[in-house]
Image: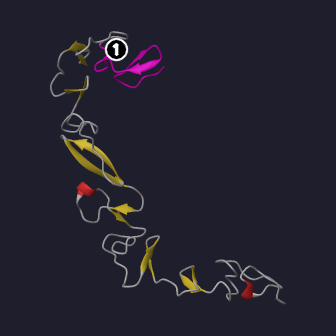
């Protein structure tokens, strides 16, 4: 087994001998109950700046599951998270989302694909009566019509959108059938 830097192969598994309670300082050396492995030595406390979180020494300055204190997990809506200097840091937004209000505490709150206030980009508002679809402001089609390539069409009467968007009526098909019915029907 080829282990990353700072880890040792212990029976086919890579272990950090400086912090692993079951392999502290050497493969198979187990720390007693109440002790933690810190710097490769079993001790009652962790070496500064590490802290003991449930029997494991962690660095609260950069551990996203114990950021600043044991159990304080960094997590943001629709975004990645990291821990820096003991504080949670908003990471990159998930595809289609953005932090439009510049408030990291609520993560990437804006859905750029469907928000009428932030359609496709922060601050790009749709006009009154429009909706946001896939990041583009659109005016809803009248009843009985369907949006095909940003144009409202009647699928029952359109020759180039016969029954569905992009399907043309073939020879012997009538537009009125929508599903390519017989021209005599």
Q: Is residue 183 left or right of residue 92?
A: right
Task: Establish if 79 lies above or below 173.
Answer: above
Q: Position of residue 44 (x, y in %)?
A: 18, 16
Q: Would you name the residue on which mark 1 appears?
A: 23
Numbered label tally: 1
Please, which residue is most extreme toward the left here? 48
Q: Position of residue 25 (x, y in %)?
A: 30, 12
Residue 85 lies in the magenta-colored region = no
How did the renderer colour the structure? Answer: secondary structure
Q: Position of residue 124 (x, y in %)?
A: 34, 75
Q: Position of residue 79 (x, y in %)?
A: 34, 53
Task: Establish if 26 lies above or below 98.
Answer: above
Of residues 5 and 173, the one nearer the viewer is 173
Q: Quadrant of residue 99?
A: bottom left
Start-end of magenta stretch: 1-24
Q: Is residue 87 left or right of residue 157?
A: left
Check the picture and name the quadrant holding the C terminus. Answer: bottom right
In what element is the residue under mark 1? loop
**Would you call the spot at circle 1 few (<14 residues within 10 Å), some (14-19), or many (20 or more)?**
many
Q: Is residue 184 left or right of residue 109?
A: right
Task: Establish if 37 lies above or below 185.
Answer: above
Residue 10 lies in the magenta-colored region = yes
Query: What residue is drawn where x is 34% and y is 62%?
Result: 98
State whether the magenta stretch is mostly helix, strand or loop. loop
């Amino acid at each position: 087994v080829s282990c990353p830097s700072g880890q040792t192969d212990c029976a086919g598994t890579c272990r950090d001998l400086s912090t692993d309670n079951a392999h502290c300082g050497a493969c198979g050396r187990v720390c007693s109950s109440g002790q933690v492995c810190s710097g490769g030595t079993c001790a009652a406390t962790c070496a500064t700046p590490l802290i003991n979180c449930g029997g494991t020494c962690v660095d609260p300055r950069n551990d996203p599951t114990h950021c600043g204190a044991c159990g304080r997990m960094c997590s943001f809506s629709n975004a990645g998270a990291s821990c820096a200097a003991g504080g949670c840091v908003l990471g990159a937004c998930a595809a289609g989302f953005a932090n439009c209000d510049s408030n990291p505490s609520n993560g990437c709150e804006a859905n750029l694909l469907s928000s009428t206030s932030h359609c496709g980009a922060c601050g790009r508002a749709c006009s009154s009566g429009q909706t946001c679809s896939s990041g583009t402001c659109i005016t809803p089609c009248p009843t009985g019509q369907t949006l095909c390539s940003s144009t409202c069409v009647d699928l029952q009467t359109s020759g180039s959108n016969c029954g569905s968007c992009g399907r043309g009526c073939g020879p012997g098909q009538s537009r009125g059938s929508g599903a390519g019915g017989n021209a005599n029907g």
